[in-house]
Image (cartoon, grey):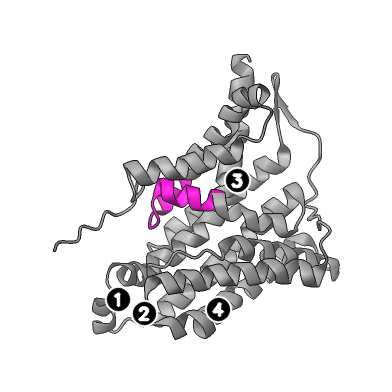
Amino acid sequence: MTILDLLELIINGSLTGLMYGAVALGIVLIFKSSGVANFAQGAMAMIGGYLVWMFANLGFSVWLAIPLAMVAMFFFGLLAERVLLRRMVGQPIIMIVMLTLGLEIFLRGLGPGLAGSTPKKIDLGLSMAPLIIGDMFINRTYLVGGIVSLVLIILSLLFFRTHTGTKLRAVSNDHVSSWSVGISVERAVGISWGLAGICAVGAGTVWGAVQGVDWSISSLLLPAVAVVILGGFDSIVGVLVGGLLLGILGSVIPGYVDSMVGGSTQNVVISLAILVTILIRPYGMFGREDVERV
């Protein structure tokens, strides 16, 4: 394998990692405000993709279908928090996490059950021909998907500098103190779920353009969880760095090893990234380390 082959793997892997980050971003946004790991984000990305496809099939252009789907998923996030999560206040955190996992399983079956199991292609009007730079071939859809994901991450960073974003950061630090100064914790958590719904549409759209929308988009939960574990559950910068790192590792290592072992080593790399990070730095590269004293 030449240096150009390695560079091609790194570039395509970076773009894939950014697209993983689009799913992971929703997990981080919810964790930053509620301290709950949302294991329904993969299925929410799938539903977001289905909504874009549905609106496009109703006659809307895909560029109008995307914001319509974002509005729908924002209100879905608000509804999920109000109907499901708010009822779990005071319950053990593990039960709340299991509730999000149950929501993941429910949505994973609901989407294909209503829309059919065949993949639904989202056409962004991109050429199928690769972008050729020298002797390197770059997938155009991955390039656009990586750019869209990067924009979502940057907008999220900017959002947390706004007045509402500052309230969400306060809620993430201490719910009781936030209540004491008049911040509605419930409203803040609801907004974070709504924002996670918007991120889900972005993720569902880019992955739907790459592989079509079907149940397999929900399986992106695994690499998304790996990204947030690498970067830190409460760090948006960690989503960017963790996504790039995981994407590169998941592209370069299989590029060298697959031919020796017969393929399918990408999931092994992702799983090892989770295990090693938890053992060495359980709060991630940029996550906040909470020290509890007895």
Q: Label 3 is placed on what type of residue?
A: Ile
Pick whichever, 104 or 20, lies toward us.
104
132 displayed left or right of 99: right
Q: Report if the CB atoms under discs 2 and 1 are less than 8 Å apart.
A: yes
Query: Which structural element holds mark 1?
Result: helix
The residue at the point 51 percent across, 74 percent down is 99
Q: CA distance from mark 4 to mark 1?
A: 20 Å
The residue where tag 1 is placed is 175
Where is residue 23 shown, x and y percent of the image? 56, 56
Q: Nearer the viewer, mark 2 or mark 3?
A: 2
Characterize the local packing of mark 4: few (<14), some (14-19) or many (20 or more) Cα atoms within 10 angstroms.
some
Query: Which structural element holds mark 2?
Result: helix
Q: Label 1 is placed on what type of residue?
A: His
Where is residue 233 shown, x and y percent of the image? 40, 56
Task: Answer whether residue 230 is magenta in the image.
Answer: yes
From the viewer's perspective, is residue 108 above or below residue 268? Answer: below
Q: Earlier in the sequence, mark 1 or mark 3?
A: 3
Q: Which mark is residue 185?
A: 2
Q: CA distance from mark 4 to mark 2?
A: 15 Å
Q: Which mark is residue 147?
A: 3
Q: Label 4 is placed on what type of residue?
A: Ala
Q: Report if the CB atoms under discs 4 and 2 are less than 8 Å apart.
A: no
From the viewer's perspective, is residue 75 above or below residue 48? Answer: below
Q: Earlier in the sequence, mark 4 or mark 3?
A: 4
191 displayed left or right of 71: left
Instruction: State the residue lying farthest toward the top.
Output: 2
Q: Which residues are magenta?
A: 223-241
